[in-house]
Amino acid sequence: MTTVPERRTTTLSDGRVMSYIEAGDPDGVPLLFTVGSPSSAIGGLAFADAAATNGVKLISIDKPGYGRSTRDRHRSLVRYGHDVAELADGLGLDRVALAGQSGGGPHALAAAHVLGPRVSTLTLISSFGPSSEASERRELNPLMRSTVVLARNAPWLIGATVAPMKLMLGNAARAERLMRRSAAKMSADDREAMDDPRSVFLLEGAEEALKSWSAVCDEFRAIGRPWGFALEEVRAPTDLWHGTNDASCSIGAARAMASLMPHATLHELPGKGHAFFGADLSVAMANVRAKAWGL
């Protein structure tokens, strides 16, 4: 296990606890960051180096039931958005920069919906979108597609799609072996991302999250069900960073999302897959700093 900064906590108005990890530039612009699904805040540390070198203070949030965050038995994306709004209040943030990666994207979108004009910038990295239409569901990989179908029609069976994740990712060493076996099928960019030492945080974040089986099921139900808001209602200045070879959520889905959001800019990353680091991530973090501070 890699070294992880000590978690901090805040108590929400209903008595639940929300925990988070701070990394990156301690004097930089605060960025409330929600990593992918399933992952605890540890996964967000994969993005800390890029944050540090671009003047961003990364505040990686433990979604309900992960880390030291209390499980929310009534979890929905909008409820999570209100949790993030309370965290922003507790941190004294009048203006809020938000980011979400992969399955964290819908969570960040919900927070932007709740926070409204307080959001200075919203960053979506390889984000999943809503799946209200069959055409949108076709843009998902088979596992996420089946998760969405179960979340909407038989939510009590969602564990059937979570079980393979637990088998593959519930142990970081086993997950790394499986990923390396599949490397031959990956693009050169995907192999580069997998070999990056920062990717270990994504594996460890998934391993920690999958210890909380009920919370993982809660998360996928929340993502798969109707979100409770429309993309057209999210009016924050938004940047989507998405690889053209993303096999988890296609570039077509990202294009559809960007077309619906009033103030969205899509940055297509040629050849990149679902995970990417390096120069592209650095540019995304520099963009956060510039927009949050009005540079």
Image: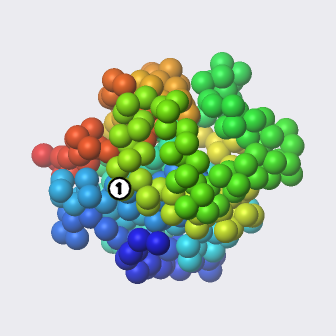
Q: Toward the viewer: 141 or 235?
A: 141
- Total numbered badges shown on the rendered structure: 1
User: Where is mark 1, residue-wise?
Assistant: 197
Q: Going 38% across and 31% down the picture, which residue do you hit?
A: 188
Which kind of residue does numbered mark 1 sit on? Pro
Q: Going 35% across and 56% down the picture, which residue do you hit?
A: 197
Q: Toward the viewer: 140 or 91?
A: 140
Q: Quadrant of residue 241?
A: top left
Residue 267 percent coordinates (x, y): 32, 28
Q: Is residue 144 above or below residue 268?
A: below
Q: Quadrant of residue 273?
A: top left
Asked whether residue 217 appears in the rendered view, the answer is yes
At label 1, counting other C-alpha atoms closer than 10 Å, the crowd grade (few under 14, some 14-19, many 20 or more) is few
Q: Going 38% across and 75% down the picture, which residue do you hit?
A: 3
Residue 136 percent coordinates (x, y): 63, 24
Q: Toward the viewer: 223 or 279?
A: 279
Q: Is residue 257 above or below residue 64?
A: above
Q: Is residue 122 above or below residue 198?
A: above
Asked whether residue 89 appears in the rendered view, the answer is no
Residue 179 percent coordinates (x, y): 53, 46
